[in-house]
């Protein structure tokens, strides 16, 4: 069955480094709340794969994406919020700040993780104001040229990854290459 | 069967859908197209606009050749099956996307020997025939980055607790 093998690939990344021997009981009870924020299409596909690979680390989490992301998220157990597409319009970006602020104050996540695109800008601005940890992963589609969102969000990211070695020198020294999400 | 897929993007991809519709009678095999937001409606092929991920995976597993736009999810889903793949990147100048970024991933996939990229839509028939001779192995989705992110989250957790 093709569908079965698709899910098997997903589950293969579940084991992580065994440096958790010092785990206290409180570590097990206390969960980080993660916000996966991205536009729809390929950006969302990559973040869903990341969430699935993270397993129990991501059990307290929700997605924040554009309307249109429902084809990848409906009928799944992933919780989601949808906001309107920003595209290239800076005014819509400001309007979205308010939406995102409302969601963040209600959910109070600890970490924001994004694969782009521009939806990451309002989300990371607020995340920094709310002292959340921010992790940005440049989309796997970016192979050669840095994207505008990446350039902006670089300054708002605690951890910044690219998925192409060629992109490393195009951003600052904070950028890391550790392979791909897919 | 040839599967044509243009993903979930909100702009249409008439250039590809119209061409494949014209070629369908010449190809002499079943063509199924996922046309997304494309306004042009095919006359010679089966088509639908959007569907669930499991149905698109099912179609990919049954297809002999897959013709895809340059979107990341479409490309990596196809690579899982090791099927002949022809990529037509969406281009800004035809109103198919907001920029030309799809060329980068398409070119990269081609450099791995896993796809043939079509820039001039009139060359697509030759590309489809050429792709059938490609020998690609299935490439599972198992990147190394999730593990690194997982470790960051673990240390983040400890930092928050202190």
Image (cartoon, coloured by chain):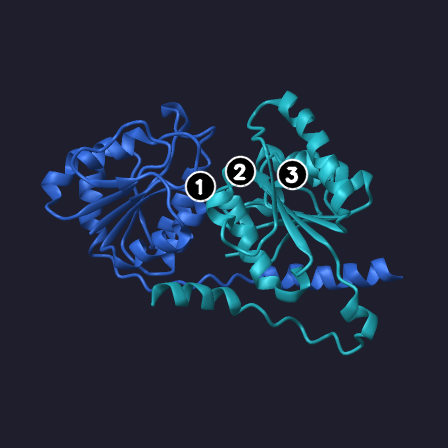
Chain colours: A cyan, B blue
Of the two numbered discs 2 and 3 on the same chain, state the one appearing first in sequence: 3
Disc 1 or disc 3, which is closer to the eye?
3
Compared to A57, does B87 lie above or below? above
Disc 2 or disc 3, which is closer to the eye?
3
The residue under label 3 is A120
To which chain does the residue with label 2 belong? A
Secondary structure at badge 3 equals helix
To which chain does the residue with label 1 belong? B
Q: Position of residue A65 (x, y in %)?
A: 58, 41
Q: Residue extending furthest right?
A: B162
The residue under label 1 is B104
Q: Nearer the viewer, residue A71 or B130?
A: A71
Q: Looking at the image, which residue is at 86% across and 61% down? A: B161
- Which quadrant of the view contains residue A167? top right
Q: Looking at the image, which residue is at 41% across and 29% down? A: B11
To which chain does the residue with label 3 belong? A
The residue under label 2 is A145
Q: Looking at the image, which residue is at 41% across and 38% down? A: B103
Q: Nearer the viewer, residue B112 or B158?
A: B158
């Amino acid at each position: 069955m093709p569908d079965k093998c698709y899910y098997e690939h997903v589950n293969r990344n579940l084991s992580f480094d065994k440096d958790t021997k010092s785990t206290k009981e409180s570590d097990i009870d206390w969960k980080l709340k993660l916000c996966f924020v991205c536009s729809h299409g390929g950006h969302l596909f990559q973040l869903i794969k990341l969430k699935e690979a993270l397993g129990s680390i991501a059990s307290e989490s929700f997605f924040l994406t554009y309307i249109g992301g429902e084809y990848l998220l409906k009928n799944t157990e992933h919780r989601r919020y949808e906001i309107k597409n920003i595209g290239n319009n800076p005014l819509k970006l400001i309007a979205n700040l308010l939406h995102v602020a409302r969601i963040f104050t209600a959910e109070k996540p600890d970490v924001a993780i994004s694969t782009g695109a521009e939806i990451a800008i309002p989300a990371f601005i607020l995340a920094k104001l709310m002292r959340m940890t921010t992790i940005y992963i440049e989309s796997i589609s970016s192979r050669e040229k840095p994207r505008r969102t990446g350039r902006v969000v670089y300054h708002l990211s605690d951890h910044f990854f690219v998925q192409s070695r060629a992109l490393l020198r195009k951003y600052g020294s904070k950028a890391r290459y550790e392979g791909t999400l897919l | 069967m040839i599967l044509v897929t243009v993903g979930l993007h909100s702009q249409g991809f008439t250039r590809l859908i119209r061409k494949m519709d014209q070629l369908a009678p010449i190809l002499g095999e079943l063509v199924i197209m996922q046309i997304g937001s494309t306004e042009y409606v095919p006359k010679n092929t089966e088509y639908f606009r959007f569907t669930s991920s499991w149905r698109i995976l099912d179609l990919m597993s049954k297809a002999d050749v897959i013709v895809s736009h340059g979107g990341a999810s479409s490309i990596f889903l196809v690579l899982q099956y090791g099927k002949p793949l022809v990529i037509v990147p969406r281009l800004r100048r035809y109103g198919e996307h907001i920029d030309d970024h799809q060329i980068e991933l398409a070119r990269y996939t081609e450099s791995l020997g896993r796809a043939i990229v079509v820039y001039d839509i009139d060359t697509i028939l030759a590309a489809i025939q050429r792709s059938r001779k490609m020998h690609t192995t299935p490439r599972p989705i198992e990147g190394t980055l999730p593990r690194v992110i997982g470790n960051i989250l673990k240390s983040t957790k400890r930092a928050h607790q202190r």
